[in-house]
Image: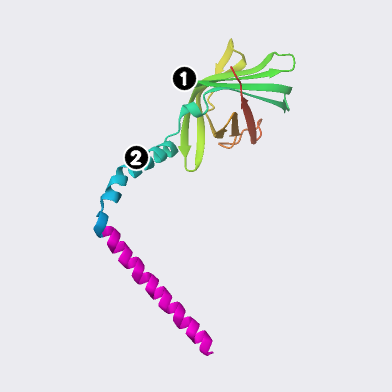
């Protein structure tokens, strides 16, 4: 029991001694250098914080800009290749079947936003049809959650509202090299 009491007292003395030394060291540093070290680093820290926060809050259209492709089996058209191209705040979407004929074509305006923790593509003023020459205006705006990574664009489609003829799904597009 005595040894435990001795060890506890030694431990307390060491802790108190360390606290006192840290306090002395802090005062020594503060008096020797003043606050010059902190004030010199403050503008740099604010600049870094502004850049990081700016990138998080404002999403850039350049994240998704370019041509993206996906091969999949569609319930309506069978084996298809879907291609979407984002350029100058607009988009074109094309679905091509095995015989390389266009079965669906759409175009419209595109913008990128941030909704809470999600990055979102908003598609508006959509015109669609079976070809570029056969387009009809639609009243269907789309909000698509996305994640853009190295050479890949993953989208979650049809989560914005229920559509009777389309399933909710996730699709991973690959960037087309040009």
- Where residue 129 appears, as percent x and y from the top left, is 61, 17
Pick the quarter of the image with the C terminus.
Answer: top right
Circle 1 sits in a helix, a strand or a loop, which is it?
loop
**To which quarter of the image does residue 147 belong?**
top right
Labels 2 & 1 near each other (Cβ < 8 A): no
Instruction: Measure the C-alpha gap from mark 2 to mark 1.
Output: 30 Å
Above or below residue 88? Residue 160 is below
Please say if 133 is above or below 17. Answer: above
Secondary structure state at the residue bearing disc 2: helix
Figure check: 119 above or below 78? below
Q: Residue 50: give x, y in percent of width and height.
A: 36, 40
Question: Image check: 89 left or right of 46?
Answer: right
Residue 121 place in picture, x, y as percent: 51, 31
Residue position for label 2: 47
Asked whether, in this view, residue 3 is left or right of residue 12, the answer is right
Q: Which residues are magenta?
A: 1-30
Instruction: Categorize mark 1 by other alpha carbons within 10 Å: few (<14), some (14-19), many (20+).
Output: few
Q: Residue 78 location in percent, x, y? A: 75, 23
Residue under the point 28% across and 62% down: 28
Prevailing secondary structure class for the magenta stretch in the rendered image? helix
Q: Quadrant of the N terminus?
A: bottom right
The disc label shown at residue 88, or none: 1
Residue at x-position 27% and y-position 48%: 39
Q: Nearer the viewer, residue 171 or 10?
A: 10
From this viewpoint, is residue 73 visible? yes
Magenta highlight on residue 10? yes
- Give the residue displayed 38% in from the left and 75% down from the top: 16
Closest to the observer, 147 or 44: 44
Compare residues 51 and 147 and report the one nearer the observer: 51
Q: Nearer the viewer, residue 172 or 128?
A: 172
């Amino acid at each position: 029991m005595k040894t435990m009491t001795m060890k506890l007292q030694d431990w307390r003395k060491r802790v108190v001694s360390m606290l006192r030394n840290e306090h002395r060291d802090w005062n020594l540093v503060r008096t020797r250098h003043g606050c010059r070290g902190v004030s010199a680093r403050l503008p740099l820290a604010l600049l870094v914080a502004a850049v990081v926060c700016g990138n998080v809050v404002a999403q850039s259209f350049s994240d998704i800009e370019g041509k993206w492709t996906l091969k999949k089996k569609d319930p309506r058209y069978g084996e298809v290749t879907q291609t979407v191209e984002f350029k100058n705040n607009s988009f074109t979407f094309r679905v091509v079947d095995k015989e390389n004929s266009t079965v669906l074509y759409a175009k419209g305006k595109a913008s990128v936003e941030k909704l809470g923790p999600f990055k979102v593509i908003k598609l508006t003023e959509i015109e669609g049809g079976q070809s570029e020459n056969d387009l009809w205006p639609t009243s269907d705006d789309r909000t698509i959650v996305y994640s853009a990574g190295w050479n890949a664009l993953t989208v979650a489609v049809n989560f914005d509202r229920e559509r009777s003829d389309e399933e909710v799904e996730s699709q991973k597009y690959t960037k087309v090299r040009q």
